[in-house]
């Protein structure tokens, strides 16, 4: 079996690349710009090209065909349409990474299946993913283009841990605040349920769908079955760091309105602020025996140990840090004014 990954070295795809490389019977190619060559496992072949340069990609792929093509970096309908042109007649299965954030917001039910409606007025990212799915399904229904749609939720790896509110460079800014004894902002009252999935668990399910006849023309969500509140997620992280969590709860609406530079309107109101519980029975029917085995406290410990031993992952964000301090300061001032008015 011959597979091509567009990307292949990101948060989700790196674990899949490693697993496919270890799985007998697969010949794997990565098509990317070659910026993370040192992370490519032995035996995996690399095709150096920018997929956004369609003519260059066409030239690099000349004469090649695949059993499976997986696009990990397609975000816009025009990118998916480009893939359709490149791979129509060249692959037996085209797998597209969509997003669980595409599901209906606000939710009519927290229990999510693949049949939950797709609609997210809060986040352009999610609406673009929906448009990509609709385009692919049309090509499947009208022409038989062999698509499989994958909807991940919050998947993490050794490069970072899930946090509810963080800067553009990732979770280190939040970990640093914890280590310095500063309050950490958690949206709402912190009791919203959230699902986080380690990328090695995601990889097991994904590889089980590769070359799987039952996956053609279908959409699958891939998550673990562990549900945690945002308070619990942050408490676990603080415990691993050996510090006390100083949680500071702030309304999601307030955070979204004062943090446009961090895209909290979409990322919070259109995703993280919503309680979601994923029903993975459809996935488990297609991939019998799949089970996520990495508990969050285990995955978070591995990630934090990796981050602490790799200074290049400790990217400071003084602007985000100051933004957090200012929000807390403003709210505390408002509290004091109201208390003074009652005295």
Image (cartoon, helix red, strand yellow):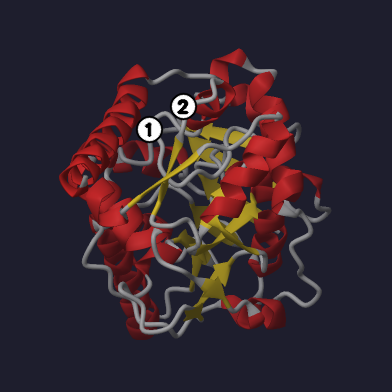
The residue that disc 2 covers is 173
Tell me: 194 left or right of 81. Answer: right
Q: Nearer the viewer, residue 337 or 3?
A: 337
Q: Position of residue 168 (x, y in %)?
A: 36, 32
Q: Position of residue 4 (x, y in %)?
A: 57, 50
Crowd class of label 2 (few under 14; some 14 to 19; many from 20; radius 10 Å): many
130 relative to 21, above or below: below
The residue that disc 1 covers is 167
Q: Earlier in the sequence, mark 1 or mark 2?
A: 1
**Residue at x 81% of width, y 74% of height:** 289
**Residue at x 27% of width, y 67% of height:** 131
Tell me: 225 left or right of 82. Answer: right
Q: CA distance from mark 1 to mark 2?
A: 7 Å
Q: Quadrant of residue 50?
A: top left
53 relative to 186, above or below: above
215 relative to 150, above or below: below
**Residue at x 29% of width, y 71% of height:** 135
Q: Nearer the viewer, residue 108 or 135?
A: 108
Q: Quadrant of residue 144?
A: bottom left
Residues at badges 1 and 2 in contact (C-beta under 8 Å)?
yes
Q: Position of residue 204 (x, y in %)?
A: 72, 59
Q: Nearer the viewer, residue 329 or 175?
A: 329
From this viewpoint, is residue 4 visible?
no
Quarter of the image for the C terminus: give it: top left
């Amino acid at each position: 079996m011959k597979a091509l990954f567009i990307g292949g070295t990101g948060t989700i795809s790196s674990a899949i690349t490693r697993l496919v490389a270890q799985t007998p019977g697969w010949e794997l190619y990565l098509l990317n710009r070659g910026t993370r060559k040192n992370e490519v496992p032995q035996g995996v072949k690399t095709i150096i090209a920018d997929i956004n340069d369609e003519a260059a990609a066409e030239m690099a792929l000349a004469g090649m065909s695949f059993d499976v093509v997986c696009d990990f970096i397609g975000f816009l309908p025009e990118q998916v349409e480009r893939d359709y042109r490149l791979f129509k007649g060249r692959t037996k299965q085209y797998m597209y990474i969509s997003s669980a954030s595409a599901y209906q917001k606000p939710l009519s039910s927290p229990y999510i299946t693949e049949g939950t409606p797709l609609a997210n007025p809060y986040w352009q990212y999610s609406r673009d993913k929906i448009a990509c799915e609709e385009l692919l399904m049309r090509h499947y229904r009208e022409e038989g283009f062999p698509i499989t749609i994958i909807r991940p939720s919050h998947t993490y790896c050794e490069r970072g841990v899930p946090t509810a509110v963080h800067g553009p460079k990732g979770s280190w800014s939040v970990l640093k605040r914890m280590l310095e004894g500063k309050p950490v902002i958690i949206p709402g009252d912190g009791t919203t349920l959230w699902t986080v999935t380690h990328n090695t668990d995601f990889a097991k399910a994904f590889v089980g769908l590769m070359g799987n006849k039952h996956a053609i023309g279908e959409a699958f969500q891939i998550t673990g079955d562990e549900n945690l509140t945002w308070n619990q997620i942050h408490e676990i992280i603080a415990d691993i760091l050996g510090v006390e969590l100083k949680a500071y709860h702030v309304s999601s609406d307030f955070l979204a309105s004062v943090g446009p530079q961090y895209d909290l309107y979409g990322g919070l109101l259109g995703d993280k602020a919503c309680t979601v519980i994923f029903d993975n029975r459809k996935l488990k029917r297609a991939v019998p025996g799949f089970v996520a085995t990495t508990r969050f406290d285990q995955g978070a410990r591995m990630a934090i140990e990796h981050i602490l031993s790799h200074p290049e992952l400790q990217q400071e964000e003084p602007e985000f840090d100051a933004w957090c301090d200012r929000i807390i300061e403003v709210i505390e001032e408002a509290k004091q004014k109201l208390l003074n008015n009652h005295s």
